[in-house]
Amino acid sequence: MTSDNDISGDVAPPQVRTLADIGRIAGVSAGTVSRALAGSPLVKAKTREQIQALAREHDFRPNQMASKLRTRRTGVIGVVIPLGHERRQHISDPFFMTLLGYLADELTERGYDLMLSRAIPDDTPDWLERITSSGMVDGVIVIGQSDQYDKIERVAANYPNLVAWGTYRPGQIHCVVGTDNRAGGRMAAERLIAGGARKLVFLGDTTGIEIAERLDGARDAIAGRDATLVHLPCHLSNETMEGELREQLRANAGSFDAIVAASDLIAMSAMKVLHEQGMTIPDDVQIIGFDDLPLAAQTMPPLTTIRQDIARGAHEIVADLEASIAGRSKQHVVMEPILMERQTTL
Amino acid sequence: MTSDNDISGDVAPPQVRTLADIGRIAGVSAGTVSRALAGSPLVKAKTREQIQALAREHDFRPNQMASKLRTRRTGVIGVVIPLGHERRQHISDPFFMTLLGYLADELTERGYDLMLSRAIPDDTPDWLERITSSGMVDGVIVIGQSDQYDKIERVAANYPNLVAWGTYRPGQIHCVVGTDNRAGGRMAAERLIAGGARKLVFLGDTTGIEIAERLDGARDAIAGRDATLVHLPCHLSNETMEGELREQLRANAGSFDAIVAASDLIAMSAMKVLHEQGMTIPDDVQIIGFDDLPLAAQTMPPLTTIRQDIARGAHEIVADLEASIAGRSKQHVVMEPILMERQTTL
DNA sequence: CTGAAAGCGCTAACAA
DNA sequence: TTGTTAGCGCTTTCAG
C-alpha cells in the first residue's frame, strides 16, 4: 500500500542569499540592490536592469521576514475559523470553505497573503489575541462568530483591523459583514406556511448566534398565525449529523409537515432521511435550506433555499479590512437574504 | 440593503510593544525577558513568573516577524493550489477544500501556521519559487499537480521541503502523496463492465495528470474486452460544468450505458442531467464517481464511487514534510483506491 | 542567574 | 544616482 523510494534532500542550496551578495557581484551596495529590485526610479535604468537580471539568474528573492520587520507591514491577512460549538475539530462546513475560497481570491487579487488558522476557543482562550497581536498580520478576518461574540467584541475594542462574517447586533463594536439571518429565518417559515404547512420544525444547533437568529426569525413568522414550530437540535456539518437527524425525524414522524433547515447541508441530509422513511418531498413534507450552496441546485428535487451572497460577502469583508488598514472608516454590511424558489416547497 | 454604522478605529494602542518595554518596567534586560517568556530554566523561577505575569497583564506577545528573522525558522507552511487548467480563478473544488481542512488540522496540531496561496501559473510563471524562496515558509505543500508537473519537478530539485498531493510517476524528484489514479480508473470501469455495461463514457478534463491517469486506467480495463470507452471532456468544478455536461450527454444520448466520472461532483451533475433527460440510474445508465466526498453518500440513489482516503493523505503529507524539515528522509505514499459500492451500479 | 552586544536581512533617511 | 548608516524587535553567545 505504501510505496518506497526514499528521497534525500541533498542539493547544494544557492549561495546568493542576501541583497549584499547580489551587491557584491554587481559592484554596488545593498541599498542600491534593494531599490533596483523594488523597481525604484531612483536607480539608473541600466544598473537597475542589470541587477534584476542578476537576481533572476541567481534565482534570488529578498527575504520577506526581514523586509516585513523593517517596514512593519506584513502584507498578510489572518483568516480564522472559530470552532466554538462544533466539537469535531475539523473545518468541514462547506459554507465556510466556499467563503474561504472567495476570500482567497479577493485577498490574492489585492496583493495580500492569507494565513489560515483553525481555532478551538475552548482549548485556547486567547485564540484571537494570539493572531491579532503576533505582529504577523496586518488584519484579521473571523469567519463565523460561533459562540465567541463577546470575545470578538473585546478584542476588536483594541484592534481595529478586524472584520467578522456573521450577524449584526445594534451597537456592536466589531465590524461585521453578513446576512440578515433573522429575516432569512422568517422568510423561510413564511414561505412554508404560504405553501400550506402548519406544523413546522427547525433543524439545527443554535449555539452559534447566526443560527439562533434564524430560529428567532422562524418564530417571528409563526407568531400570531395558525402554525407551530418545534426546534430539533442537530449538528451542522459532521458525520454524526445524519444519524442525529434520522433519530430526530423518526421520533417526530408524522408530527410535522415542513422543515426549516439551518443550512443546505442539513436540508440535504434531511431529504435523504425522509426519502428513506418513505416520505415524498414536497408533498408530504416541504423543506427549505439556508445558504444556497452550488449543491442546492443539484439535489432531487432541487432545494428551495435562502440565499446568502457569499461572493459579495467576501468582497465586502476585504474592502472593509483594506479601508481599516488604510486608516479609513469601515461599515457593517447586512445583506438581505433572497428566497431561491426551487422544488422542495409547494 | 447595506447598513450604516460607520466605525472609526480610534483606540489607543497598548504602549508596551517590545521586550525592552517589559524589561524596563520589570527592571531587567530584554534578554532576560526573552528567556523568561520562552520559559527558559536559565532564569530564576520567581522573576520568570513575574515577567510572565507582566506580559499577560499588558497583553504583550513578542513580535513574530522579529523572532522568525532572528531564528531563521518561520513555523509557517505554505499551501498552494495551482489553478493550472481550470480557467475560473476560484478555489472551489470540494475535494481540495476537504483536503485543505484536514491539512489545517494536522498542521495546527503540530504547531505550524498555514499560509494559503492560490496560484494561476499561466499568469505567474514563478508561482512556486515565489513561495519557496521568499523566506516566509519552512516548507510547501502543493495541492494537486494540475498541469504543472514539470515545474514542480524543477523547483523541488533545489528545494527539499516540498510535498505534493497527486500522482506518482516512477523516478520523479518531488515527494508526492496520493492515490493510484490509474488503478482507480481501472477499478471503476471494471465494476461497470461487471455490472453489464459495454458502452462506457469517461467524463472529465484530462489536462491535469491525475485525471489523465484515471482515464488511462479506464482504458486499461476495456482493453481486450468486449467494451468501448469514449472520452467526453468537461470541466471539473465550476458553473459551466453542468451546461457542458448537458450538451455532452444530449449529443451522445443513447450511445452509452455507463459513466466513469472523473470526480464525485461531475458524477452528481451527470446524475441530475440524466434524470432531467428521463434516464433511470442505474438501470438505463450506471455511474461511478471518484473521491468519495461525504456528499457521495447523500445523493439519490447513493453514488458508487472510488474512495480516496483524504484524512490519511493529509496526515502523510504533513508527516513527510516534517521529516524533510528535520533533515530526515521522506517517502512517496501511493494509496490504493477503494471501491465504495452504493447504488448507482448494477 | 543576568546583562551587554552582536546580528538575522532588509529599508529608508541622509549625505555625498 | 548611489553609498552609508541606523535601526525594525528579537535571540543568543559571551562575560560576569
Image (cartoon, coloured by chain):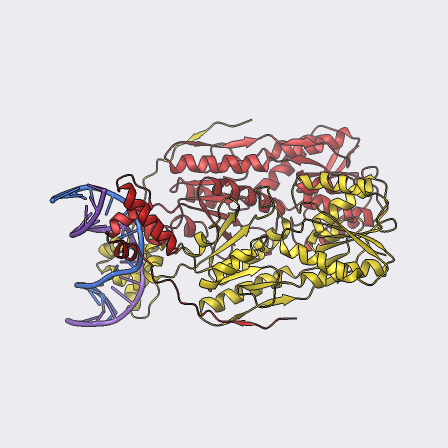
Chain colours: A yellow, B red, C purple, D blue
Quadrant for the N terminus of chain B, please. Answer: bottom right
The percent coordinates of residue B25 (x first, y second) are 27, 57
The percent coordinates of residue B295 (x first, y second) are 69, 43
Q: Nearer the viewer, residue A26 or D12?
A: D12
Q: Nearer the viewer, residue B5 or B195?
A: B5
Q: Is residue A286 left or right of residue B162?
A: right
Q: Is residue A86 visible in the rendered structure shown here?
A: yes
The percent coordinates of residue A84 (x first, y second) are 57, 48
Q: Is residue B38 above or below residue A132?
A: above
Q: Is residue B55 above or below residue A238?
A: below
Q: Is residue B72 visible in the rendered structure shown here?
A: no
Residue B192 falls in image quadrant: top right
Q: Nearer the viewer, residue B74 or B41?
A: B41
Q: Is residue B90 above or below residue A240?
A: below
Q: How many marks?
A: 0
Q: Is residue A68 left or right of residue A151?
A: left
Q: Residue at x 81, y 47 (%)?
A: B275
Quadrant for the C terminus of chain B, please. Answer: top right
The percent coordinates of residue B188 (x first, y second) are 69, 33
Q: Residue at x 30, y 45 (%)?
A: B48
